[in-house]
Image (cartoon, grey):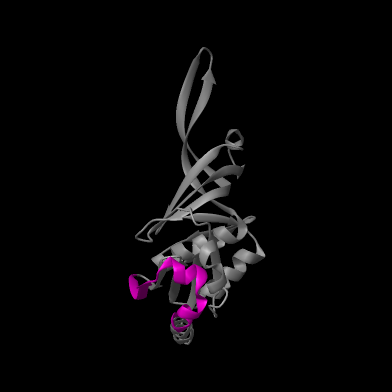
Amino acid sequence: MKKEYKGDYIILEPESRFDIIVLYWITKSIGKIGSTIKWREKIESGLKTKKISDVATILIQYNDIRIDHKIRSLRVTGRVIDTNKEELIGRKIGLDISINGRAIFPKDKVVEKVISKTSSKEVILVIVLDIDGYIIAEVSDRIEIIDEKYIPASVILDNEEEFRGDLEKINEIIRRHREKKSIAILGYNVGSKNLAKKIRGIDFKLEKTLNAN
């Protein structure tokens, strides 16, 4: 990932799927992300109003964030909290950050920590656990499914003992990957929260509600 400092901001340019997940991680951690957008500005001239195209730099406080299914872009929506175009403050705007695009973050210890933690890594291990089972994938410049299993919701919700063997398997996969240049991210919903606590070696955890998209 390319990095540049500009004033009070850090500009990051994602170059791979790995980097898209890192941007997601940073945004979820600090609640903010920015970029440049094309903007149609109204100019009053006598009795006429002209619209001219311009470029605005904005920072938004996000309220929704999604990664596309191919992990090649990030879609973030939220309200503008800082910009070089004052009329945009408070507006709800969506940003699309793709591979080879640009994301802007305020200088922040959390941002620096995530960048430092991931800069020497080559692979992200993604574990998704919900009330239907789990899936584990390696993400670098490509996506490779390592393991997946359907498990009845009754086991996930009410019978942790039956899941013991699967937990041991997941923890062993994580342990092996951490010996390589990889980091581990776990996504889970509230129904699988107790089991998620027993998964070890995770760098970043994300909890979602049962009805989340």
Residue 97 image offset from top left, x and y in percent: 44, 53
Residue 25, placed above or below residue 60:
below
**Residue 110 placement, left or right of 146:** right
In which quadrant of the rendered view does residue 133 lie?
Answer: bottom left
Give how far across and how far down residue 34 sits, in percent.
54, 50
In this view of the protein, which residue sits in the foreground, 170 or 185? Answer: 170
Residue 152 within the segment the image draws in magenta = yes
Q: Is residue 182 visible?
A: no
Looking at the image, the residue that sits furthest to the top is 47
- Front position in the image: 185 or 94: 185
Q: Give me the residue at 51% from left, 41% from top.
A: 93
Residues drawn in magenta? 142-166
Up-down relation of residue 55 to residue 73 (above or below): above
In percent of width and height, residue 82 lies at 62, 44
* Image height of 143 relative to 102, above or below: below
Q: Residue at x 47, y 84 (%)?
A: 168
Nearer to the camera, 180 or 173: 173
Q: How many marks?
A: 0
At a point 49% along the width and 19% down the height, the residue shown is 49
**Camera sees residue 207:** yes
Q: Position of residue 145 (x, y in %)?
A: 34, 73
